[in-house]
Amino acid sequence: MCSRPDSVIVGIMAEVVYVSNVRLERRKGPLRLAYLPGEERPVSFSVHGGIAKHYGVDEKKLGESHAATIDYVVAATAG
């Protein structure tokens, strides 16, 4: 059974101060380009190592190795 404590305050969300306008472009297989605000050139995302193996991607067929999405998430939250 789950109940809401009496001390929970319910309010109205503040004004939105930022909207991230990002465009993704899928290339070949897991290779994607992300056009991010503040970046002059697109950022490449793909898979590598254990991530490629987990998803059954042959790294030799990728041609080029790039950081995976999770690598960027970890870097962003760790910073």
Image (cartoon, rainbow, N blue to C red):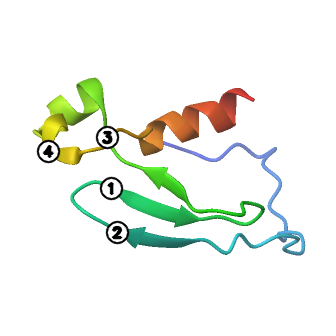
**Image position, residue 16 (x, y; %):** 84, 74
Does 75 sit above or below residue 7? Answer: above
* Residue 15 in picture, x, y percent from top left: 89, 75
Question: Are the two marked residues, 1 and 4, in contact with CB atoms closer than 8 angstroms?
Answer: no
Marks 4/3: CA–CA distance? 12 Å
Per the model, the C-alpha gap separating discs 1 and 4 is 11 Å
- Residue 26 marker: 2
Residue placed under numbered mark 3 in the picture: 47
Residue placed at 32% from the left, 43% from the top?
A: 64
Mark toward the start of the polypeptide (4 vs 3): 3
Residue kind at label 4, given as amino acid type: Lys
Residue underneath mark 4: 61
Question: Callout 1, which amino acid?
Answer: Leu
Residue at (62, 32) in percent of width and height: 75
Pinpoint residue 24: horizontal percent, then vertical percent: 47, 70
Query: Mark 4 or mark 1, which is nearer the start of the sequence?
Result: 1
Classify mark 2: helix, strand or loop. strand
Q: CA distance from mark 1 to mark 2?
A: 6 Å
C-alpha separation, residue under disc 2 versus residue under disc 4: 16 Å
- Residue placed under numbered mark 1 in the picture: 31
